[in-house]
Image (tube, rainbow, N blue to C red):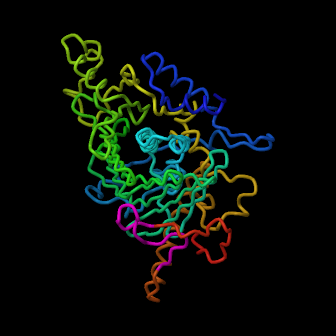
Amino acid sequence: MNSEEEFYDAETGLESDDSCEVSFKDALVFDSKQVTDGSAAQENGAWERRKKLPSEMISRNNFSVWSILKKCIGMELSKIAMPVEFNEPLSFLQRISEYMEHTHLIHKACSLPDSIDRMQVVAAFAVSAVASQWERTGKPFNPLLGETYELTREDEGYRLISEQVSHHPPVSAFHAQSLKHEFEFHGSIYPKLKFWGKSVEAEPKGTMTLELLKHREAYTWTYPMCCVHNIILGKLWIEQYGTVEIVNHSTGDKCVLNFKPCGMFGKELHKVEGHIQDKSKKKRRVIYGKWTECMYSVDPKVYEAYKKSDKKPGGDSKKLKQEHSCEGEEAEEMPEVQETVTVIPGSALLWRIMPRPAHSAQMYNFTSFAMTLNELEPGMEKLLPPTDCRLRPDIRAMENGDTDTASTEKERLEEKQRAARRERSKDEEEWSTRWFQLGTNPHTGAEDWLYTGGYFDRSYTDCPNIY
């Protein structure tokens, strides 16, 4: 086995382990192989990606959230202009690109000969895509109509283009492709945000499509609901809940994942459980873990036997002592979190989250990957279209810690967008998207925004002036 094969075996753990100790050891090997200090040095040592933001997170101590939100109960927040104090220094288009943080899982799926094994890793990729949201309580900037974002990662073997294709409703479309023509990953998202008094609920409407080209397979799924608690008072905390169905349209295999809500005693917080079934609806694997930590798979018979033994008297006494009761406390208070997943013997590790940098809490709780997303790499500005997020002055000012300039620029850009919309209305002119068009998803038959191609030809003469 060569070093590359050893690397992928360690990070996915697809070869089942017979003990908890071995599984956990594999997870640590994955971390030590994958996790660095956030840099990705070029081979010649000339340049490496940044490890932190230019400035620490702006203070929100003197800002009254309630003064803004008290008029918004039950309303959709995506239609309301918010002060920059609500934001983190990224556009929603850049936030979408964080789905690609664990692209090595797609590469692994491409390399596997068995469709059930591929489904396991695709399921892990789908869960990993929401992991960066943990403790990310800042709101990304709403993209302007026509705004774009490009992310090319030769070290990870892919490139991505996204565009804000609609303003009302706000819809963001993206398309990622392997540099070696192994996969395509695309979708469009309409993030519906509602304020309910103590919490903000986010519904990411839209379908994700992953195509593994060598296997001629297409997988589709939607993402779960997300809720940010304690918007007004207390410590902010996040939960994801809902059912995610991943369908392999080529084989008929399906993975059903249940993102569990917190529950009365908090013991379900962050948990994800589900199963993979083949086209005859026979359960082939059970998937379990936490979206904030890791995912495992195990044989269904082993899982059921473990659950039965776990219910025997005295079998769970240690776990019961660790449970945290919320009785007599505020309903929104964050329950105590068990930091590890109980590993069932015989399980295979599919994915484990990468530790965040030590200074993450002072930098909007960004991951190492997120730290790099708004960075202008050497020579990049000459290649980018004028609509790229990195060139937005309000986001750049906020990243640099200049709140006043960020606020002024945000208001200017929003007014410029409104003025442009009024002009189009007066001239009875429709907005034309540049890189995507509304069409039909060939796998679901549903309406979808599809990439039309041509972005990487670098011809940007007809791009709109939005900044």
- Answer left or right for 61 relative to 202: right
Instruction: Indicate the quadrant containing the C terminus: top left, top right, bottom left or bottom right.
Output: bottom right
Looking at the picture, how far across and down is residue 10, in whole percent? 55, 28
Name, please, the residue furthest toward the bottom.
427
Give the x, y percent position of residue 30.
Answer: 56, 28
Residue beneath the point at 28% across and 35% down: 262
Q: Quadrant of the N terminus?
A: top right
Q: Position of residue 354 (x, y in %)?
A: 53, 33
Residue 166 shows up from this direction = yes
Front residue of this view, candidates 197 and 384: 384
Q: In this orientation, which residue lies closer to the viewer: 159 or 261?
A: 159
Image vertical order of residue 107 relative to residue 264, above or below: below
Give the extent of the magenta segment: 431-449
Residue 61 at least partly seen: no
Residue 69 magenta-drawn?
no
The residue located at (65%, 67%) in the rendering is: 385
Q: Name the residue located 48 percent from the left edge and 54 percent from the top edge.
A: 216
Tally of numbered tags: 0
Q: Is residue 384 left or right of residue 70?
A: right
Relative horizontal placement of residue 85, taking residue 33 as reference (left or right): left
Q: Is residue 196 left or right of residue 29?
A: left
Picture layout, residue 115 above or below residue 35: below
**Residue 112 place in picture, x, y as percent:** 51, 40
The residue at 25%/57% (across/down) is 74
In the image, residue 447 lies in the stretch drawn in magenta = yes
